[in-house]
Amino acid sequence: MKKYIPPEIKALLKRKLKIRASKPANELDKLKLVPRYTKTNATIDGIKWQIPDSASFLFMYDEIFRTEIYKFKTKNQSPYIIDGGANIGLASIYFKQLYPDAEIVAFEPDPEIYNILEANVKSYAFDNVKLIKKGLWNKETTLKFRSEGADAGLLETFNESDHTNSQNITVTSLRPYLQKPIDFLKLDIEGAETVVLKDIAEDLDKVARIFVEYHSFKGEQQTLNELINILTEAKFRIYMSIPGDNSIKSPFMGLSNYNNMDFQLNIFGFKEDCS
């Protein structure tokens, strides 16, 4: 005999099933529902993360942990890795999971983002990770920095028209940290990459692999040619891609402009004989 279910109970069950089906499947799905620049937490693989901005976190998480754009092989089980522009720590944490005995030096100038970086790295209880609250430049000095609240804070040198959330930060040369072989050098430093590479050009013979995110600023002279010349003269083999495959389909119709940038490019450099 077919069991009778009152119509009002059926309606209630349907509503509950609909709500359950619409609920996020996991913590990453939940983050998609969080508005931009809203501080939140997420537990991923049993570890609690502090997150200042859900959209940039999801983009970086996908690139770093799913696509694994920084994945590399080395016979050195204790590789020396420099993370320039560490943000909230995704790359440094990925590197330590890839090579648990790695020595990592990570730079992040944004004071608020640095605090989150520190908390996230501490959650994993890693050894041999040195965090430095400084930006990278060609000398030790103080510069004006504009915080964006997520992953795109930059020196006012590259966006002089916007003084929102402006503050002084300490910047430093990378040269003192290149006194021994570097297995992987990551530079995602929002426009300072060419200045830094010019400063360390003579030390790049010690670097086996390098990742640089190049940034072009609206109305400013592009420096991509200088950057590529520095890398090729240092004997790097080059590969390039657009971040997130977000290339403009019809660039002659106009370039998009975000945070005063009109072009970004991922540049991967490696020595033919690195192992």
Image (cartoon, rainbow, N blue to C red):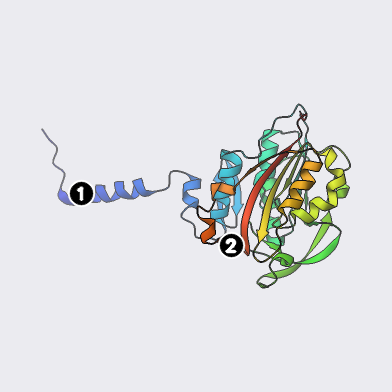
Q: Residue furthest top?
A: 75
Determine whether the residue tagged by mark 1 lies in a helix, strand or loop: helix
Which quarter of the picture shows residue 128?
top right
Q: Is residue 119 visible?
A: yes
Q: Nearer the viewer, residue 67 or 208?
A: 208
Q: Which residue is mark 1?
A: 9
Q: Is residue 216 above or below residue 105?
A: below
Relative to residue 243, is residue 233 drawn left or right?
A: right
Mark closest to the chain's N terminus, 1 or 2: 1
Query: What residue sits 67% from the left and 34% below the top?
Result: 98
**Dot 2 amino acid type:** Tyr
Which quarter of the picture shows residue 115?
bottom right
Q: Which quarter of the figure is the N terminus placed in?
A: top left
Q: Which quarter of the figure is the C terminus placed in?
A: top right
Relative to residue 232, is residue 163 drawn left or right?
A: left
Q: Is residue 130 visible?
A: no
Q: Residues within 10 Å of mark 1 (few under 14, many from 20)?
A: few
How far separated are the C-alphas under marks 1 and 2?
51 Å
**Dot 1 amino acid type:** Ile
Q: Closer to us: mark 1 or mark 2?
A: 2
Question: Could you tell me residue 33's position as x and y percent?
Answer: 46, 55
Q: Is residue 141 above or below residue 103?
A: below
Determine whether the residue tagged by mark 2 lies in a helix, strand or loop: loop
Relative to residue 54, is residue 108 drawn left or right?
A: right
Q: Which residue is mark 2?
A: 258
